[in-house]
Every structure is written in C-alpha cells, then in structure tokens.
Amino acid sequence: MNNLLKNMTWLLIAVIGAAGVGGIALNRGEQINALWFIAAAVCVYAISYRFYAAWIAAKVLVLDETRATPAERFDNGRDFIPTNKWIVFGHHFAAIAGPGPLVGPTLAAQFGYLPGTLWILVGAVLGGCVQDMVTLFFSMRRDGRSLGQMARDELGPIGGAAALIGTLAIMIILIAVLGLVVVNAMKHSPWATSTVAATIPIAMIVGLYMRSIRPGRVLEASALGFMLLLLAVVAGGWVDHSAALRGLFDHEGLPLAWMVIAYGFAAAILPVWLLLAPRDYLSTFMKLGTIILLAIAIVLLQPMIKMPALTQFIDGTGPIFGGKLFPFVFITIACGAISGFHALIASGTTPKLLSNERDIRMVGYGGMALESFVAIMALIAASVLEPGVYFAINSPAGVVGKEAVDAVAKISAWGFPVTVEQMQLLASQMGEATLFARTGGAPSLAVGMASIFGSAFGEGMLALWYHFAIMFEAIFILTTLDAGTRVGRFMLQDMLGNLWPRLGETSWTPSVILTSGLVVGAWGYFLYIGVIDPNGGVNLLWPLFGIANQMLAAIALCVGTGILIKSGKLKQAWITGIPLTWLVLVTSTAAWEKIFSEDKRVGFFAAANDMAVKLAAGALPPEKAAIAPQLIFNQHLDAWLTIFFVATLWVIVFDMLRVSARHLTGKPVPPVSESPHIPSRLVEEYARD
Amino acid sequence: MNTVKRALKRLWCTIRRLSGDDAYERYVAHHAAHHPDAPPLSRETFFKQWQDDKWKGVKRCC
C-alpha cells in the first residue's frame, strides 16, 4: 500500500512535469503563465534526482556508505571536517551559484523563451548535475584532489597542463565579461554607481568588525553589513536627487572601466580579511535571500510570459549577440545548464567536508539542480518584460542606433512594438535617466525583478527595487571578480615559481604586485576593449566565455569518462560520455563559426577584415577610425584564443581516448589513483539518526 | 510550542554553522578531543588563521 502510494506520487509528479514541459513547448500564440515554468522545472529535477541520480549513485559510482571519507580519515578541524549534509549542501551551493546563471539566460532570451528553458532543464539533469556529482565523487575517493591533479594522475601530464591553462584562461575572460556587465549597469547612473561604490567601505567596516572589534562574530558583522547595504540603496536615491553629488557618480563607460580595474588590483593585493572575506559574506547572504524572495514573488504573482516562444533571431541576426540558435544558445547558457567551473569547486573544498559517501547525490546532483532553477527564474524575469522593452534595454547602440527614436523604430520594425515614451516612463519609474543600450543582462534582469517584486510587495518602490537588484548583482559580480583575480594570481605564482622560486612565494610583496598586475592587466585589457567596442563587448566576450567554460566542463567530463572506463565501467561510461560528446560538438561548431564565419557579427576574422576594409576606404567616422586598429587587433586576438581553446579541448579528448583505448587493449596506463578502502567509524551514528 | 522552539533553535544552529559563526566553538571542541595536552588558540588568533586558510583555493564560481 505504502509502495503504491509512493509510486502514485511519482506518477503524479511525472504527469505534472510532462504537462508543464508540454505546455511550454506546444503553446503557440497564447500567453503562458510563469508558474508552468516553475512546475515543469521542479518536476523535471525531482524525477531525475529520484531516479537518474539514484541509479548513478547505486549502479555506476556504487557509493559505499561504510567507507570512510577523507573528512573522517584526515579530520583536522580545519579543512577536513565531517559535516552534516545540509551544511555541505549550503556551502557547495553558495560556492557554485554566481552571476553566471543570471546573465546567460537573460541574454539567450533573444531567441525566445523556449530554447533557453529546454536547454537549462535537459542540460542540467543529463549534463551539469552529472558532471558535478561524478567530479565530486572521484575527488572524494582521491582525498579531495583538484581537477588538475586528477587529470594529471589519471590521464597524464598533457591532460593536467590543459586543465591548468584552461582554468586560468576562463578566469580571465570571465572576470572581463562580468566587469563589463557591472560597467554597463553603472553607466550614467549616479544611483547605481554610488550604491555599488558604497559596498566597498561597507565591506571594509564588516571586515574590521570581524577581525578586530568582535573577532569571529560572523553573523553579527553580516547583519550590520546587510543593514548598511540597504541604507546604501536608499542613500543612492538621495545622491541621485542631489545636484551637487550627482556629478561625482555620473560617468561614461570608460572611466568606470578604469575604476573597476583599479578596484580589482587593490582587492587582489589587500589582505583577504579587509575586503574579500567580508564582501563574500554579504554577497552570500544577499544571493540566498534574493533568490528565495524571487521564487516567492514569482509563485505569489504568477506573472505572464510576454516573450514569444521563438523569435526570428534564431537565424543568427540577433541584436544582443550574433549567431544561430545552434550552437550559440548552448554556449550562451553555460552556468545553469552545465558549467565547467563547478568542477573546480566539486574537486577541492566540498569533498573535504562530506561525512558520508551517500551525501554525494544530494550535494553534487542536488546542488546543481538548484542552480539550474536559479537560471530558470532569471529566464522568467527576462521573459515577463515586454519583448520590445527587453530588446530596447539590451540592444547595443551600434546595432539599433544611438538616438532613442532610431532605436524604437528599428526594434518596432522587428515586430516588438515599443515607444520612446514607454521607455522614458520605465526609466523614470526605475530612477534612471535612460535604459537604452544597457547590454549585459543586469539592467534588464533588474527591471524584470523590480516589476515582479514591485507587483508582489508594493508598486510604489520600483526605483528602490531596481537599485536593490542592481546592487545585488553587482555585489556578487565584484566578489567573483576579487576571488577570481586572487585565484588567478595564485595560479600564476605557482607557474612562475617553476622559473624562479621566489616568484612562487605567495607572501613576497614584489611577486604579489607583479602577478596581481599581470592578471588584472589581462582581464582589464578585455574589459577595456569590451567597453570601447561600439557593438557592445558582450557580443565579443560572452561567446568566448561560454566556449571557455564549456571547454573546462569537457575537461572534467573527460577525466570522469576516463576514470569510469579505467575502472571497468565501459558500459556505463555514457553517463559522462553523452554530455561530453554534445559539448565537444557544440563547442567545436561554435568555435568554427567564430573563426570562419563570413558574417561580421559572428566571425572574428570577418569582423576584422570588414573593419580594415572600411578603415582603408576612409568610410569610418573619425571617432571610430581612431579606435579601429585596436579593435582589429583584438578581433585577431580573440580568434586565436578561440583556436587555442578548441585545440586544448581536442588535445584532452584525444588524450582520454588514447588512455581508454590502451586500457581496453590491455596496454599499461596510469593506474587508478583511488585511496584504499578504510571502513567508516561514523556509520553507527548514521544508523541511529 | 516546544517543537517550534526546537525547530527555531535548529535553524539558528544551521545558520551559525553555515556562516562559520560557531567555527571557534567547534575548533575548541575538536581541540579538547584530539589534543587535550596543549592549550587551544585564542579566539582572535584562531579566526585569523581560519579566515586566511579559507581563501587559499578556488572559493567562488561564476
């Protein structure tokens, strides 16, 4: 009876999920409620968690709850600590969920809501969740070793080097593109700029409080910081209304980019306790709070989706980024569907906390499912906007024209009606001078969130909600920027230490300044180019980031597939093999188009040639002609970077195939480096609760 | 009433645990269990080391 009831429940979930997905996919011409997206997503995650993840745990990875985890064996009260699974889940989720799942789906909404939704759901349950779970498992069986070390141990030195270089490259591109998102959100917005600027001294106050005034009182300090942040949002409005203060915070994109670069350098060399750690606390609390609030607001409000299922831009002519639906939707939405970056978290911090192997399913698979849900909510927030408004906010001036009249005329001609008055009204409601050409996803997401929050919790405070959303996105983009710069610095010091050991000392000031400068200089360069590019740097940088992130995911899946085959599980190796094949296909096609396409909005070389021809013919206006040589050089650089990424990808795929083939034909391969089985002594406690 | 109180207390413990607010208390307990002969670090010194340790590797993602 009990069994029957259980089966009926799962059957019901399956029916609701199928109805949700079917409703979303087959709905034509009528408006659809956002609640269907939530229902479809939750049911898809529940079913795949209950059946697919359970099957992987029991039959493929064969989780052994009697086996001692590294946390139990090396318990040192510091990094190896046996921890309750909910706590590990919280830590893991807070670490993997960054701004990526908010930005990618918002940009990909230019294709309509359908492609993004389907890819987020299918990509997560068959790809991303599996990647995180498998990587977490293999790292845990190897004492919490990192992805790079596992690649070296299991595949060989080539795989290890590829993983290391891939990580550094993705970090640089990621920081540049996130910096661009923040710059576009602050451009000519005294309110947003002053609020974001205020987060820096607030973080320092919190840091000082935790370090010196009340050492270790993390929660007190965070509560203080949270109140100061809310005050900063309100105070930003005062700045915006004060004629004297406005001017201080009203800037063009380029000076803002320089400020972000200077800030990034300062953050990398200041001690962690002063800026990075307290900012991280604030952003984690903000992130969790806002995501929960957004979910509640969507369920309460049940907004209608206004974006069509598919737009004409699936043919590759999209204003936000160029390129056809295949492969570019799969590159644009990386985080939220499958993100290689997660493999770095899943191999490192998290495996050292697990107290029992069976928690892997919840932490690895469940954590990614929740992040994917965040991506679905971001897609909803972008799709509840009128499509005309969405395109007006996100289309760069280089595509639709600098003047508001030209922009609305062009966007309306695409079939997404919008008027200048409508945009002005919206901008004044949000407390902004203009919302045109704010490419990057943050402002349109903030408008979407503000309208959802405003309708659910009070219409009168739209401007406050908007700037709260901007502050919320900026604070954790800046956290990623700080943390990423620092990680990049450590990796660079590690590499340079091989040339000259002193450079490898992480506390030797000249080395710290040199390596921080190199890392900041690298992402600062791409940020600079992104800001001066008249077509909006997002078109340039986001695909590059997507390709790099999917390349890292492919490396993680190669390591996973290689280990599965070497452990005699060839028959089940498809669990990582299928997402790997798909990623290789998608990434290679995207790279091919970015390199060889003759469309100047897609191909890097085509864009460079087009600009060179125009420059030679004198067809460019003087301000464009002045920056043209830089843009041409950058297009070439981006093309070569893409070639490098895709070459790295193929090297590691071939390395994995080589090792697997040698193993299958009985030739010697690097041995499986799993730690020996030691029975757990924590099991009895487990049996009790 | 009691169940509500217990649930709230558990929630509070979870929040403290997640944020690292109780890290020092857990360290003292661990220290007492594993190295009873040496005195534990002071709250301030422990927190400094704990915070610096925490930020050595990849901590945050995209």
Image (tube, coloured by chain):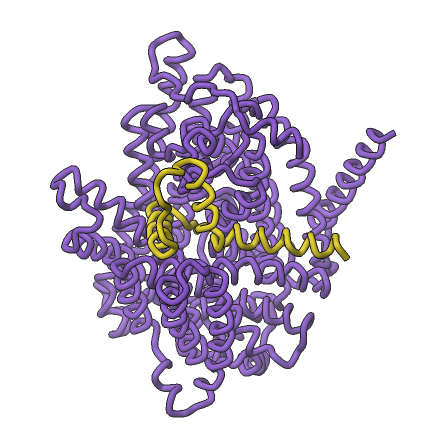
Left or right for A112, reference A268: right
Front in this rendered view, residue A194 or A306:
A194
Q: In which quarter of the image is residue A625?
A: bottom left
| Numbered circles on residues, count | 0
Check the image and report above or below for A497 versus A203. above
Q: Quadrant of residue A77?
A: top left
Residue A328 seen by the camera: no
Q: Which residue is drawn at 74% across and 59% down?
A: A30
Screen quadrant of the C terminus of chain A? top right
Check the image and report above or below for A305 versus A163. below
Chain A palette colour: purple
Residue A147 seen by the camera: yes
Outermost front residue: B37
Left or right for A217, reference A295: left
Q: Residue at x 45, y 26 (%)?
A: A141
Percent x, y of residue A537: 37, 61
Chain seen in yellow = B
Front in this rendered view, residue A629 or A185:
A185
Percent x, y of residue A327: 48, 44
Front in this rendered view, residue A267 or A688:
A688
Left or right for A182, reference A453: left
Check the image and report above or below for A643 versus A651. below
Percent x, y of residue A275: 35, 63
Outermost right residue: A1
